Amino acid sequence: MTGIRIGIVGGIALSVVLFVSASTGWAQGADPWIGTWRLNTAKSTFSPGPPPKSNTLKIEAVSAGAQKHTFDGMNAQGQTTHSERIGKFDGTEVPVQAVQPPIQASATSAFRRLDSRSFEVVNKSDGKLTSTVRVVISADGKTMTQTQSGTNAQGQKANNISLYDKQ
C-alpha cells in the first residue's frame, strides 16, 4: 500500500506504499518500520481480486527523516513488479520511480503521520486521487497492515487489506 492505481504493483498501491519518518517513542530508539516486509496473501483480502502472487517491501533510512521504500513482487498474471519512493513524512507529494511494469501516468504519493504506529498515504495519478492507504504497525512491530480504498487500473472501486510480516 503511489499515485499508482491499485492494480499497478501486484494489485496494491503500496505505495504502498510508503514513506515514514523515524518513529519516536519506541523501545530502545529502534525504528520498527525499517527492514524487509513480506506480504501474507493468506491473511490479506483484495476486492476486486485477484491478489498478487507475492510482494516484498524493503524500508531503509536514507537520511534524517527520509526513507526509501522499494517494492518487488509478482502480480496475479505472473509479471514482475517493482517500484521505489524516497521521501520525508511531511505531506509533500513525491514521485513513484522505477516502476515495472511501466505506467503511462505521472504517479505520486504523499505521506502524513497519524501517530507513532500509523500513517496515511494519498496516491495520485496525473494529479487525480487514485487511492488512500492507512498503514498501521502492530504493537510488537512484527505485522504491518495496509487498508486501501480507491480505484484500480480498470476504474473499479477497490478495497484491499494487505498484511505484511516482518522478515
Image (cartoon, rainbow, N blue to C red):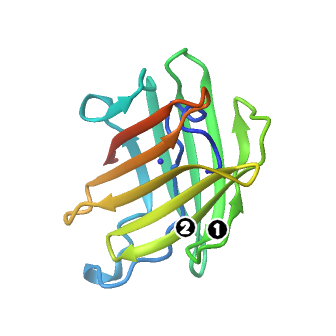
Q: Please state which of residues 86 and 49 is positioned toward the viewer in this rendering.
A: 49
Expressed as whole percent of the image width and height from the top left, the position of residue 86 reads 66, 62
Q: Which residue is mark 1?
A: 87
For residue 137, which quarter of the picture? bottom left
- Which residue corresponds to mark 2? 111
Residue 28 drawn at (x, y percent): 28, 82
Q: For mark 1, does the 10 Å Cα neighbourhood hold few (<14), some (14 to 19), or many (20 or more) residues?
A: many
In the rendered image, residue 133, in percent from the top left (x then y), is placed at: 45, 54
Q: In the image, which is nearer the foreground, mark 2 or mark 1?
A: 2
Question: Residue 6's quadrant in the figure?
Answer: top right
Quick check: 93 above or below 9?
A: below
Which image quadrant is residue 92 in? bottom right
143 vs 51, left or right, is left
For residue 167, above or below residue 78: below
Q: Amino acid at mark 2?
A: Phe
- Considering every residue shown, the one lying at the far top of the view is 77
